[in-house]
Image (cartoon, rainbow, N blue to C red):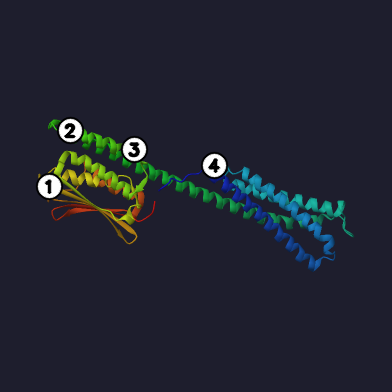
Amino acid sequence: MEQTRSFGIEEDAVVARRRRRAELILIGAFWAFAVLMLSIRALVIDALPISIMGPRRLALALIGATLCFGMARVLAALRGRSFPERVFWGVLGAFLMSATLTGLTMTINRVILPLPGMSFSLVESVQWSLVWLGYFLAWTGTHLALIYHWESEDHHRRATVLAEMTRDAERAALRYQLNPHFLFNTLNSVASLVGDGRNREAEAMLVNLAAFLRSTLTVEPAGMIPLGEEIALQRLYLEIERARFGDRLGVEFDLPGDLAETPVPALILQPLIENAVRHGLGRSEAPLTIRLSAAARGEAVVLAVENEGSGEAQPGGAGVGLANVAARLRAHFGEQGALEAGPVAGGFRASIRLPRREC
């Protein structure tokens, strides 16, 4: 069955956890790469053994990762700001992080755990600040690109949800358009029976009408139901009409069992059958047979409503009818849904083509 997609609390929480993991992986991978580059550099120009420099590089990576994580939280807090503004703060943050990391590493290497033969050098500090600035700018740019991707993803998801909500509203509106039209015609039939003194038939029609409405009101206005359930509703509707027309109205159904679970818009056949009855019996005293069939055609299912017995049958529906069916098919299936209607020998035939799916 078709379900409306929406942003729920659980979905948002899952997305947030996934993105936090992505942030941590990005930071970890970035500083693993930085440590690798420093180690390669040390093999070329450093004389100090790895037993001395290794722990310091790990400490440096831990400090750098902490700074990046903090900057990621700052950028997250700026989510409501314009993207150029966040770029500005990201670049400013890269300068501040490079200065902070340089100051802390110089303090460790020159004051807390001084390296042999090394003293404070302003030129060296500036050089390392520029080195770390390049690293932090690279990380900031990558992180901002990731944020931009996530926001584009959110925009697309929300656009998809809004489009689905719009389609649901259109489907519901078309269904609600159908209901008063059907009720008007049925109550008209009851009035005709009462006027002819056929009170028993009128009572039977009202009982069937109540059963029909009870069934249809439980269906989601914009929803889908199995084809077998749709056929059952139309059987009930035709029982209402048989109370009025009696033996003049004959009905034939051809529904293969393997198509019974095919989802169709609720009451999609209603206007077609209503047209067949009204235009077939309303213009002639001759008996009328309505044939409702379903058949698989490759990846599609074709539903057909055909009336035989009156060559005068015409399409129509008081502004609803076939136009309603065509609009609902477009709303549900786009180009995959189609309606064809036209006269055939001795009657009229309307067929619906829709994609074959499972509920």
Give the label, 1 or 2, closer to the camera: 2
- x and y, in percent, of residue 6 in the image: 48, 44
In the rendered image, which residue does mark 2 sit on? 200
In the rendered image, which residue does mark 4 sit on? 9
Secondary structure beneath label 1: loop
Secondary structure beneath label 4: helix
Which sits in the foreground, 50 or 338? 338
3 or 2: tag closer to the N-terminus? 2
In the rendered image, which residue does mark 1 sit on? 287
Amino acid of disc 3: Leu
Residue 137, numbered circle: none
How far apart are labels 1 and 3 at the CA level?
Answer: 32 Å
Which sits in the foreground, 343 or 63? 343
What is the crowding at mark 2: few (fewer than 14 residues within 10 Å), some, or many (at least 20)? Answer: few
Residue 217, numbered circle: 3
Left or right of 221? Residue 82 is right
How far apart are labels 3 and 2 at the CA level?
Answer: 26 Å
Which sits in the foreground, 42 or 65? 65
- Residue at the image position 60 percent from the left and 46 percent from the top: 85
What is the crowding at mark 4: few (fewer than 14 residues within 10 Å), some, or many (at least 20)? Answer: few
Give the label, 4 or 2, closer to the camera: 2
